[in-house]
Amino acid sequence: MTREIIIAPSILAADFARLGEEIAAIDVAGADWIHCDVMDGHFVPNISFGADVIKAIRPVTAKIFDVHLMIAPVDPYLEAFAKAGADVITVHAEAGPHLDRSLQAIRALGKKAGVSLCPATPESAIEYLLDRLDLVLVMTVNPGFGGQSFIDSQLEKISRIRNMIGDRPIRLEVDGGVTRENAAAVAAAGADTLVAGSAVFRGGNSATYAANIAAIRVAAEAARVAKPQHSSAQPMRTGEAVRLR
């Protein structure tokens, strides 16, 4: 079956002075997941927020919290983010020496496990981990800052990872420079979960956020109709209750 398109707005692009209101606005506007980019100023050249902020905003929405940890070391903090309300916890393949152990730890906490690849990291890094994964995140910018331009060379990597996944119930997510203009190419390459920050949060209110989300979704779904992706297994869906708290 064709995997449904998931739109996961990144709150990194939200107005942090009104973060709870912004999350409520994208919830109403049609966001499927809430993407939380956690940066430590060490693994990436920026600092965003930590587990306490995620805990504080968790009551604002029932949507899936898609927590992307751009931190190193990562293992000491997995439990804190799980307890804060993360549903999906994604760690970077480049962030530690024992990726398999990190993924096991995430699943032991009752959470969905994801792995992210920076633009220079080949897909071979996850070849022997696929059966431990619920999500693969392809970075289409170098992590650390919002508002960067999409790196076109990653489309080929997305396509190769889609082939690697095959019929496994693994979501293929793309994060970095996703807009209504390139969403079709991203979906045609095989992605089914699109993270968008600046492209969603421009406009400053729920109505414009809804229009932005809808435009990205329409572009992606049109590409999927033209080039459908098939799977015999069902990955996480928009309304799936994955919080095991």
Image: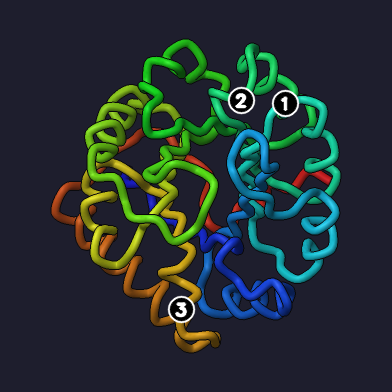
Does residue 133 sit above or below 151 in this rendering?
above
- Which label belongs to residue 73? 1
User: Is residue 217 found left or right of 64 in the rendered image?
Assistant: left
User: Is residue 148 found left or right of 201 in the rendered image?
Assistant: left
Task: Work out whether residue 234 can be spotted.
Answer: no
Residue 127: percent from left, percent from top: 42, 14
Residue 125: percent from left, percent from top: 44, 16
Instruction: Locate the N terminus and report the quarter of the image it occupies.
Output: top left
Q: Residues within 10 Å of mark 1 (few under 14, many from 20)?
A: some
Q: Residue at x 37, y 74 (%)?
A: 214
Q: Are marks 3 and 1 in contact (CB under 8 Å)?
A: no
N-term mark: 1 or 2: 1
Q: Are marks 1 and 2 in contact (CB under 8 Å)?
A: yes
Q: Residue at x 62, y 49 (%)?
A: 46
Q: Residue at x 60, y 63 (%)?
A: 11
Label 3 vs label 1: CA separation?
33 Å
Q: Secondary structure at mark 1?
A: loop
Q: Which residue is mark 3?
A: 202
Does residue 154 sit above or below 10 in this rendering?
above
Q: Amino acid at mark 1?
A: Pro
Residue 87: percent from left, percent from top: 69, 46
